Amino acid sequence: MFTKDHNTPALRLDANRARGYTGVVTPSPASAPADADAADAAGPPEDADTGAPLAHPRASRRRGQSLTRAIYLATLNELAESSMEQLGFDKIAARAGAGKASLYRRWDSPAELLLEALADPDTGFSEPAAPHTGSVESDLAAMLTDFAEALDQPHGRALRPLMTRRPRHPELYEQVQRLVVQPRMDALLEILREGERRGEVAPEAVTPRIASVAMHLLVAEHMAGAPIPRAEIDAIISEVMVPLTAPRES
């Protein structure tokens, strides 16, 4: 009597069909990527503030505003440590724990992403306003202290490579000037106007050039790479701005 060998391929398939096996392999949820971005994530994500690797990458993946903030901070920190020439979506994605595809879909270039990060009120420079303390010296102290503190944050440190390589990126530099510097110049000019109305500032001193002096001195100090001490701010006000703006005795 002929005995069928159940180890032959044909009979193994018949036996599998009898058990309900169709030959189609369906990936288990654990083996399938969570989404298209998870499949192309470049390495383990880092903490956006400290740069330290996160312990559980998949469990800590972010979405929505949390992910956007992480991308903004990763962009600013990456630029602060390198240059515009080295700033790329791959490095930003790896640092933020995001997929490169998500960055390419949302932004046309790292420069566009950088400008958004700098303009964001949470990760970048918020809109300045004159403090209105009732005194030019107090107004200047409040304004310049706020700017000095911002310069020591990721968004402030990201400005250094842009300033040192201004000739290589003139258009980007001008956009940053309009976005970051000009609003603060306008607020400083408003401080001088209010001081003139109170008799603290000479009318001829209310000019954009004089208003910009304190900002330029702070930026120059910032380029040294260390936090700007309060004593330096006080010296800029008492030794430079007050003598420049005080009414002249007739």
Image (tube, rainbow, N blue to C red):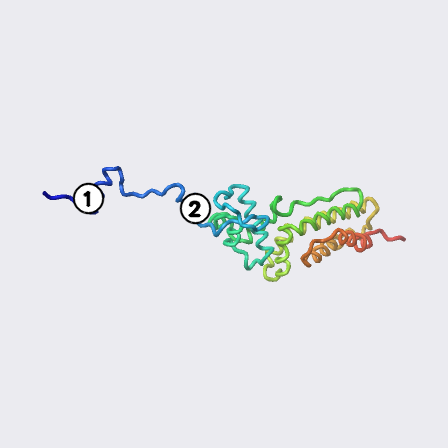
Amino acid carrying label 2: it is Ala
Image location (x, y in percent) of residue 10: 20, 45
Q: Residue at x 86, y 53 (%)?
A: 248
Query: What is the number of callouts on the image?
Result: 2
Image location (x, y in percent) of residue 86: 54, 59
Amino acid carrying label 1: it is His
Which of 205/135 is in front? 135
Which of 24/175 is in front? 24
Which of 242/63 is in front? 63
Instruction: Mark 1 and mark 2 in contact? Answer it, CB < 8 Å.
Output: no
Q: Which residue is mark 1?
A: 6
Label 1 environment density (alpha carbons within 10 Å; few <14, some 14–19, many ≥20): few
Which mark is nearer the camera, 1 or 2?
A: 1
Label 2 environment density (alpha carbons within 10 Å; few <14, some 14–19, many ≥20): few
Q: Is residue 107 left or right of residue 143?
A: left
Labelled disc at residue 239: none
In which quadrant is the N terminus drawn?
Answer: top left
Q: Is residue 158 left or right of residue 145?
A: left
Q: Secondary structure at mark 2?
A: helix
Q: Which residue is mark 2?
A: 36
Q: Secondary structure at mark 1?
A: loop
Q: Residue at x 48, y 47 (%)?
A: 102
Q: Is residue 79 above or below residue 29?
A: below
Q: Residue at x 24, y 41 (%)?
A: 16
Image location (x, y in percent) of residue 69: 56, 45
Image location (x, y in percent) of residue 249: 89, 53
Kindly indicate the quadrant of the structure image that contains residue 236: bottom right
Taking the view exactly as shown, the residue that stands out farthest to the bottom is 167
Taking the view exactly as shown, the residue that stands out farthest to the right is 250
Query: Of callouts 1 and 2, which one flags the residue occurring earlier in the amino acid sequence?
Result: 1
Give the Cα distance between marks 1 and 2. 42 Å
